[in-house]
Image (tube, helix red, strand yellow):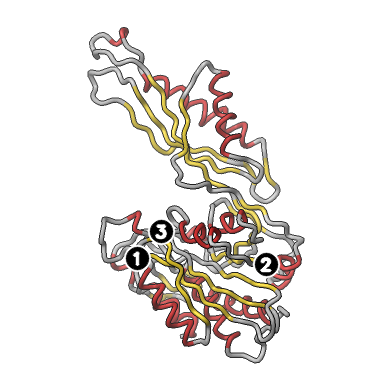
Amino acid sequence: MTSTEKLLAELIALPSVNPAFLPPRHPHAGEKHVADFLAVTAARAGLEVEFQKVLPGRSNVIARLQPKNKTRQTILLAPHLDTVGADGTQFIPQRQNGRLHGRGACDTKGAIAAMLAALGELANSKSRPLETEVVFAGLIDEENAQAGSRALAAAGFKADLAIVGEPTKLQVVTAHKGSLWLQLETRGKAAHGATPQLGTNAVLQMAHVVDILETDYAVRLRRRKHRLLGAGTVNVGMIAGGTQPNIVPDRCTITIDRRTLPGESETGVRHEIKALLAGEKLSANICSTKLAPCLPLETDAKLPLVRRFLQNAGQTKPAGVDYFCDAAVLAAAGIPSLVFGPGDIAQAHTTAEWISLAELERAKNLLGRFFQSLP
C-alpha cells in the first residue's frame, strides 16, 4: 500500500457528509473530523496550518508551504472536504481489483490525498521552490452552497493559479458549465371540482409551460454551442400543484435546472424564458432558488501557469466538463482556476463509488512534477 492510498483510506473512514443532506446532529454530518485529521497530517509534513471558520463547527483547513526565498507567486490547491450522503458501509474503505471503494473515493478525497501527499513530499525534498508558495485549502460545503470557497474568496485570498480538485480522469479542465435553479409559478383561480368551468387550472397552464421548456426551448439551446462544453441544457426536475382532487388548483410551481455556458447570465436566462413563454401567450413568475450565483467557468488556456500545467500533464488542449464546482467561485474572485483530479465523475455520488489506485498515484506524481517545475 502506497502512502497516498493509505491517506485516502483514512479519509474515507472519516465521514464528512454535508449537513444539508442529513438530520440535525447526525454523527456523519460535517467536515470537522476530516479537517482536524488533515491539519495534523499537514503539520507533520512541515506545513504551516490554520483554520478559517466559515460556519458553526465547519472550517476550511489551510496548509502552506513557504518558498525558500521571497514569495513571488502562489499556487492554490483547492479540493472540497464534504461528500453526499451514504450508508455506514460506504465509510469502510474496500480495496478490490486495483480500486479503492468508499464514499468520497473520487469526489473528492482522492484529490485531497494526491494533493496533500505531493505537497508533503515537496516539503521534505531538495526541490522546494525558491519563489513559489503552495497553499492547500480543504474547502467545506461544495456539495451544497459552496460556503467554503465563497468565504475564502470573500476574505481576499489571492493566488496566481488555483487547481480545484474534482474527478476529471486527470484531464486538465479550463471550462465548466454554470448552474441555475429557477422556480416558475403559474396562478389560476380555485373552484369546486364539480364545476371546473368556474375556475382557472394553474396545473394545466404549467403543463403547457413544461412542454415548451422541454421541447422548443431545449431545441434552441442545442443550437448554441461552446467549443469545450457543447450546449446548455434545461431539465424540469420538480413540480407541485393543487391540494386535493376536488379543487381546481389555483397555483402550480416547477423547479428547473438550467446549465449555463460562459457568457450567459441569470438575468439573460430569465428574460429568454419570459420572452419564449410570452410568444406562446403564457406567463409565469420566475425566481432563483440558489443561495448564491453558480457561474460558468472559462479560464484562458494561454495563461503561462495554465499552459505550464497542461504541458506537465502531456495535454495539448484543455477539456471542459458539464458540472459546476468551486473553480468558478474562485475565478470570479480573480484567481485563474482550472479543475483537475483523479477519478471519474461517473462514479461520484453512486453507491459503489471508487477510484483507480494507479490513477491516484499518477495524480500525485503529476502534481509533484509540476511543483518541481516552479521557480
Q: Earlier in the sequence, mark 1 or mark 2?
A: 1
Label at residue 350 = 3
- Residue 242 percent across, percent down from the top left: 29, 25
| Residue at image location 71% in from the left, 78% down from the top | 374
| Residue at image location 41% in from the left, 77% down from the top | 9
Cα–Cα gap, marks 3 and 1? 27 Å
Does 148 sit above or below residue 261? below
Cα–Cα gap, marks 3 and 2? 34 Å
Quadrant that contains the C terminus: bottom right
Q: Nearer the viewer, residue 355 or 166?
A: 166
| Residue of label 1 | 57
- Nearer to us: label 3 or label 2: 2
- Residue 336 percent across, percent down from the top left: 66, 61
Q: Secondary structure at mark 3?
A: loop
- Residue 219 percent across, percent down from the top left: 60, 32
Does 301 sit above or below residue 322? below
Q: Secondary structure at mark 2?
A: loop
Circles 3 and 1: CB atoms closer than 8 Å: no
| Residue of label 2 | 160
Q: Earlier in the sequence, mark 3 or mark 1?
A: 1
Going by the numbered disc 1, the residue's amino acid type is Gly
- Residue 143 percent across, percent down from the top left: 44, 56
Going by the numbered disc 3, the residue's amino acid type is Thr
In-image side of 284 versus 195 (left or right)? right
| Residue at image location 60% in from the left, 85% down from the top | 122
| Residue at image location 38% in from the left, 65% down from the top | 58
Which quadrant of the view contains residue 320?
bottom right
Q: Earlier in the sequence, mark 3 or mark 2?
A: 2
